[in-house]
Structure formats: structure tokens, C-alpha cells
Amino acid sequence: MKNFLITGGAGFIGSNFVHLMLKKYDDINVVVYDKMTYAGNLDNLAPVADDPRYNFYKGDICDHATVDEVMQKYKIDIIVNFAAETHVDRSLTEPGGFIQTDVYGTYILLEAAKKYEIERYHQISTDEVYGAVMEGRSVETDPLEPRSPYSAAKAGGDMMCQAYYTSFDIPITITRGSNNIGPYQYPEKVVPLFVSNAMEDKPLPLYGDGLQMRDYQYVLDHCEGIDTVLQKGKLGEIYNLGTGAETTNITMTKAILHLLGKPESLIQPITDRPGHDRRYALDCGKIQALGWNNQYNFEMAIEATVKWYVDNQDWWHKIKDGERYKEYYNRQYSGREVEK
Ligand code: NAD
Ligand code: TYD
């Protein structure tokens, strides 16, 4: 049996990864280690709650003593680090927590990897570390030009991983994923926000001209890609992980409305995000050379995603009906409407 520590496993991508791995392999144990911030949700892990190979441990990756305790208690062989503050808009108003978790927390986990001489430390990173890419596609050797506190903190985490590989031979790998969509995504990110707003006949707050481009990837394709790098990736290496195709936000928004049979008059233009990156675009040739490829294109991914939120309304209502979410939404969006 291999013992996995999945940090941030109660969030969106981490919980999908836990489901995938427990389905795919009989010979693994999984410990989810999660601080349970606003984005952590045990409902995301309900389908595996009774699996004897799964354990949950509440803790902060910045807390050296608790990380040490969990490493010893569960004899961890592999760490996959999903734990992070992840929302760009929140990083613009409260950057401190991003630097703490995404940089300092990564360092604490790398120290644990060093102390316990584990088999692999895998870092989940993002295409946003390359900054806005107006032409062409980012390759793994491109310089990092992060432009938001979120992407700057993620870039710091990546560089710390590379430093631990170079300085201490820690067996690290890194994947840089694009914008994921699918089940269990907290409805602050654009797709679950727009799908759930549309279902409630509420406005869809589209930033600026809506012509920004993102590579929207189905979360299961991302998780399979991570597993491919765990199996076949070369130590010390970085792998881009996306679909390699971009969609404008306005096209994504109209696709959601069309799938739900809702009118385009629900689209509400609002003032743009400061420093909004216009486009991200990845070259994914390096991970494809390991034998991985996407199973979902944009149309399939958005359709499967919309269906999940239609079929799981209790899941998102529980979040959106809470005071914490409502307070966030008002703070973030009120008074930003611009004329259509
Ligand atoms: P999420 O916000 O849904 O979940 C983050 C999880 O981390 C939550 O469960 C939260 O409680 C936990 N967490 C936060 N701070 C912690 C701490 N200090 N200690 C322990 N746990 C903590 O995020 P997500 O969208 O699932 O993203 C997961 C990872 O993937 C992140 O590293 C993110 O940067 C990266 N990523 C996300 C996307 C995307 O589209 N969502 C794309 C590329 C990369
Ligand atoms: P988001 O889901 O926040 O991911 P990221 O900023 O990490 O790419 O946003 C995706 C795109 O959608 C981005 O171009 C910003 C835009 N967006 C809106 O137009 N309105 C919104 O309310 C949000 C949250 C995002």
C-alpha cells in the first residue's frame, strides 16, 4: 500500500483527485489534510467518507507541528499539494493569506518531504504563473511573469519546489494546470457562479468586454494528467496541463445560457478586474509525450459541468444561501454594473 497525503483535498480539484485515485487503485491509502477555509467542504468527500482507505485530518499546511504529526502517523510516501488560496479577486483585496499558504505552506511541506525522505512531492500549480500571453503558447521553460498576488504566490511556491530539488534532491514534480471546471467547484469561480446565477435568474456579472481567453479544462482530465506525471513524470520537471484550446468568456457565458435555456439578457457587464490577464495559453506537448491526453473538449466539459450543477442544486444552495457567501458576493459585486 502507498500512503498519499492530499493537502487541500476538501476543495474542488483535490476532492476530484481523491475520488479518481480511490476508484483507480486498490493499493493506496489517502489522507486528506485540509485547513477547511471557506473553500474546504466535506460534502465534496461524502462519496468516499466510508471507504476504509480514506482518512481526513483537519490542519494547516503552514503548521509545522501538525504536518509532522500527520506525516508520522500515516507513514506518508507521496504528498500531492492542492492546498492554496486560489481566487484571484480575493488576492487583490487580501493578499497576505495567499503568500502565507501558497509560499510558506509549500516550504513547510517541502521540509516534511525532506525530513521523511518521501518518494514524491507533487506541486499543483497554474498557467497563471506565466502571466498574460497575448500570442503563442507558454512552454515550461518560459520565464515566470505573474501579475496578480495569487499568481505571484503560486510562482513563489513553484520556485521553492525547484530550489528543494536542486539543493536537497527532493523528488519533486510540478504540473501547471489551466482553468478547471466540473463538480464541486466553489461558486466564486466564474463557471459555477454563472451556472448557479442563471438557474436562479440572477444577472451574470461579466468583467470588462468579456473577450478575455481561458483554457477551460474538465477537472477529470486534469486529475488524470496529475496521475500520469506521478507515474511517468521525470523528477525535477514541470508539465503544463491544459486542453491547449482557449475560449473567450463571452462564448463560455453564452454556452452556459444556451444549455440552460436562459436568455442572454441575463448577462450584466461590470467594471473589469484590475490587472485582468487577457489570455492564458499552454503548450501541452511535454505531458502528451507521456501518453496523456484530454477526453473532454470545451463543449463536452461545459455540458457535463452544467449538468452536474443542475443535478446537485442542494450542494451549491448550501454554500450560496449562507451569510458568509452573501457577504462576499455583495462586497465583490455591488455597484459595479456598467451600461449594456
Ligand atoms: P479550492 O479553493 O477549491 O480548494 C483549496 C483547498 O485548500 C480548500 O479545501 C481549502 O480549505 C484548502 N486550504 C487552503 N489553505 C490551506 C492551508 N493553509 N492548509 C491546508 N489546507 C488549506 O482550490 P482548487 O480550485 O481545488 O485548486 C487546487 C489547486 O489547484 C490550487 O493549488 C490551485 O492553485 C491549483 N489550480 C487551480 C485551478 C482552477 O481552475 N481551480 C487551475 C490551476 C491550478
Ligand atoms: P476565474 O474563474 O476567477 O478564474 P481566473 O481568474 O483564475 O482565470 O475567472 C475566469 C475568467 O472569468 C476571468 O477572465 C475573469 C472572468 N470572470 C468574470 O467575467 N466574472 C466573474 O464574476 C468572475 C469571477 C470571473
Image: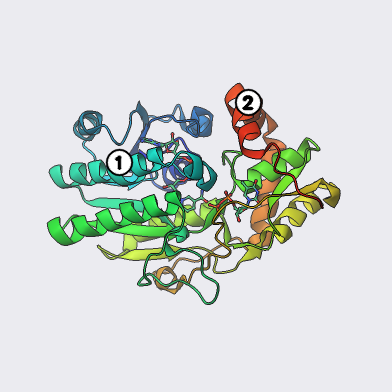
217 or 154: nearer the eye? 154
Q: On the picture, is 144 further left or further right than 67? A: right
At horizontal 59% and vertical 45% (from top left) the residue drawn is: 189
Badge 2: residue crowd in 10 Å (few <14, some 14–19, many ≥20):
few
| Real-space CA distance between mark 2 and mark 1, rounded to the nearest whole angstrom | 29 Å
Q: On the picture, is 278 further left or further right than 127? A: right
* Rendered view: 45 above or below 307: above
* Rendered view: 170 above or below 184: below
* Mark 1, secondary structure of its residue: helix
Q: Earlier in the sequence, mark 2 or mark 1?
A: 1
Q: Which residue is mark 2?
A: 318
Instruction: State the image quarter where residue 211 is shown.
Output: bottom right
Quadrant placement of the N terminus: top left
* Mark 2, secondary structure of its residue: helix
* Rendered view: 94 above or below 161: above
Q: Is residue 77 visible?
A: no
Amino acid type, label 2? Lys
Ligand 1 lies under 8 Å from the Cβ of mark 2: no
Q: On the picture, is 248 further left or further right than 274? A: right
At horizontal 50% and vertical 34% (from top left) the residue drawn is: 39
At horizontal 53% and vertical 51% (from top left) the residue drawn is: 219
Amino acid type, label 1? Gly
Count of numbered marks: 2
Ligand 1 lies under 8 Å from the Cβ of mark 1: yes
Colour scheme of the picture: rainbow
Instruction: State the image quarter where residue 296 is shown.
Output: bottom right
Label annotation for residue 105: 1
At horizontal 58% and vertical 63% (from top left) the residue drawn is: 278
- Eye-nearest disc, 2 or 1: 1
